[in-house]
Amino acid sequence: MSQICLYLELHQPLRLAPLSVTALGSQVTSYFHLATHDDNQVIFSKVAKKSYYPMLALLKKLLVTEPEFCFALSLSGVFLEQARAYEPKILALVRGLVETGRVELLAETYHHSLASLYSATEFAEQVALHTQTLQQLFGVIPTVFRNTELIYSNAIAEQVVALGFAGMLTEAVPRYLGERSPTRVYQSATQSHLPLLLKQAQLSDDIAFRFSDRNWQWYPLSVEQYLDWIAQFGSTDSINLFMDFETFGEHQWADTGIFEFFQSFVTDAIQKYQHRFVTPSTALWGDSSGMYDVPEPISWADVDRDLTAWTGNALQQDTLRLLYSLEKRVRATKDKQLLNDWRLLQTSDHFYYMCTKWSADGDVHAYFSPYESPFEAYRQYAVTLAHLREHLE
Amino acid sequence: MVGWEYPPHNSGGLGVACQGLTQALAEQNTHIYFTLPYATGLGSSHMDMLDCSLQVGQFGSAQPPFFVYQTSTAQLQSASTLSCSTLRVLPQSQMEAQVSAYTQKVTDQALLHRDSDVIHAHDWMSFPAATQVAQQLAKPLIAHVHSTEYDRIPVGNGSRFIQQTERAGLLVATRVIAVSYYTKELLITKYGIERDKISVVHNGITPLQVTPAVVSSPFITKRPVISFMGRLTMQKGTEFFLRLAQSVLQQVPNALFIMAGDGDLYHELLWSVADQQLTASVLFSGFLRDRQREMLLDRSDVFVMPSISEPFGLVALEAAQRNTPVIVSRQSGVHESLPSALVADFWDIDLMTKQVVGLLTDKQRRTEQVVAQQAEVATATWKQAADQVKQVYRRAFLGT
């Protein structure tokens, strides 16, 4: 009998509309939507059909049939905005889940940004904005924080402590965790300690990445096998399964059997194995097993679990530098629309599209990118920033 | 005439020049058969287009070399079309095969249209075809040079095959037309062609139907705009444009540099811009056509053509025509037709910086240059070019 802490991330970026250099200086309706054809809507609705609706329905059903089942969701502000605009039924479904009292919502940056790395002021404001939005939409105030892509460092923990959160989620990275188990609660290496929950990467990625991999030795993964692995942990361990919500139905399509797997996983875990589901705020109560000292930022992405997916090359570094260098001037305009546009340009996905790592990770990047190449992502982003800058001249 | 590309399926100036010249010749009652290595599907009202389509498939059209330099915007070209720039990067065997297949097709067509008085070939791709036709029909051959391998690969290690094809065509030609004195000198020094055999005929430019100022444009940025337009290749001096940007920005921090075009240095240039933290100041528009292209030239405060070697440089005339002051490298032909343009050696960043900053800050000077350029553009007509070409025909025909 172990403790399972499941958290699913719901996020969709607002992709850029293809603005032209030869329109610089003219008022553009939106940097993200074209009047004629809105790719964001097309993609959001497609993913909604494949993943959001069926998975939310399944979670709802499991909350009814399994009174012990509970889990956490984190919804980015950009996701919520798009859901409201394109598929408002999703918000009603999430509200229904939250009302059971067994679904914990986590705090994050509204714009799914990298602000924690570049501007403490901006970071705090985006987190506050996100909390307000959760309160308005779902009537809850989150107490546990998860940063964009689980990005974490001692310096970021200091910022999160200052914002008053009860704990934070991040990745277990061996170069900092050493031989210690990710299933324990750790403390941040900061002045006042922040309890941390670490992702159990092996078991999380078995579902998120390997589930439909025919070359994987455990393919096809059986629920029994998976629960046996979990059963090897002790009763004081918390198996933290953190993954994208879209794992269900989008990254792993319905025909892989992912939904059936998930349903049996939950019911069997509770009924056959007597595992206990907990949400992060409960899991954080566990005794601390020591300090997790992370001097350089880590994340849950790619093989290296570092920042190179967003800040690894010059294209990314220079656009990020430029973007955050505009902060003062953007704020000085007191133009709300401009501030909002500047924030939407902070969404981490814009930089992810510019990634040029061509290892196994490159495939993952290409899968998620709307651009034909990282170069086009950079080119388009630079043009959009120039449009924004026109308002600052 | 043996051609290789023609608007709208063109990658650069060669197609535009063929269009301007043939239209003007046709107006002077010249009957032209024009061959192309692909089907245009468009026809032409001023000449007879002869379709000499190559079966690209037989060389494996799915092979990457055919598409490496093809860009999203250039996909107007049908998949089976080879532009000059795509052709020149093929492995030599494929390049030879293409040119030889074209030679055969053109010869077949020419034998069906024996009434030509002169065979006029545009650049190396068409030289072997034109040579064979001229021999079989016993007609004079005019080799018209719009660019040479020494221009395209300025470091000097261009394709031997192309250089040999160029030289063979030039040697056998009855007369040679160079698009500038700059090119004429190059043909003499690099290819050993007799000075007297070469006539210079500068390209013309088609007058605008609508004055630029009349059409409204959304491109109204308040920042000073300095533009580059051309293939992003070493020949065009892209690296020097970036150096110029870096240097001008020291004095004019909000200047905006725009590079329009596509080419094999594109990615390298993006890296360079990001590395030098120029993302805010140097933007890439991709390959521009039609209205987009006009809008960029119209709005530009300065147009710079820093080519390392440019036989002519029609785009500089276009910029001048659209009221933009022009700076061109001394290593180009166009300033022979546009003496008011400012001239600098392509490597002379200090001088170019002074010229750009001068034009950006001194309105009077800018206006004077624009007015002077307009007067020169007005005389650079295709009609005049056609007159000169006909004189060359006459000389070739009479053997003088």
Image (tube, rainbow, N blue to C red):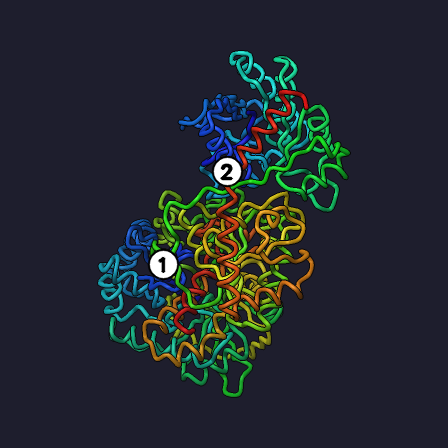
- The residue closer to the viewer here, A222 or B317, is B317
**B213 with respect to B167 (left or right):** left
Using the image, name the chain to which the residue with label 2 belongs: B
> Of residues B119 and B304, which is closer to you in this image?
B119
x then y, percent, for residue A31 = 36, 61
Q: Is residue B224 or residue B396 the one in the foreground?
A: B396
When the figure is inspected, residue A6 is found, relative to residue B40, above or below; the finding is below
Query: Measured along the vertical axis of the image, is residue A370 above or below residue A179?
Result: above
Q: Which residue is mark 1?
A: B218
Tell me what residue is drawn at x 43 percent, y 51 percent.
B294
Check disc 2: other Cα within 10 Å, few if <14, some if 14-19, many if 20+: many
Q: Quadrant of residue B43?
A: top left
Residue under the image location 31 percent in, 53 percent down = A38
Looking at the rendering, which quadrant does residue B248 occupy? bottom right
Q: Earlier in the sequence, mark 1 or mark 2?
A: 1
**In this rendering, the label closer to the viewer, 1 or 2:** 2
Which one is nearer the viewer's eye here, A39 or B184?
A: B184
Q: Is residue B391 left or right of residue A337?
A: right
- Amino acid found under the numbered disc labelled 1: Pro
Q: Report x, y in % for residue A199.
A: 49, 66
Q: Which residue is mark 2?
A: B382
State left or right for residue A226 relative to residue B171.
left
Amino acid under label 2?
A: Trp
The answer to whether residue A305 is seen in the rendering is yes
Residue located at (44% from left, 59% from top): B299
Label 1 sits on a secondary structure element that is loop
Which chain is home to disc 1? B
Judge left or right: residue A157 versus residue A254. Answer: right
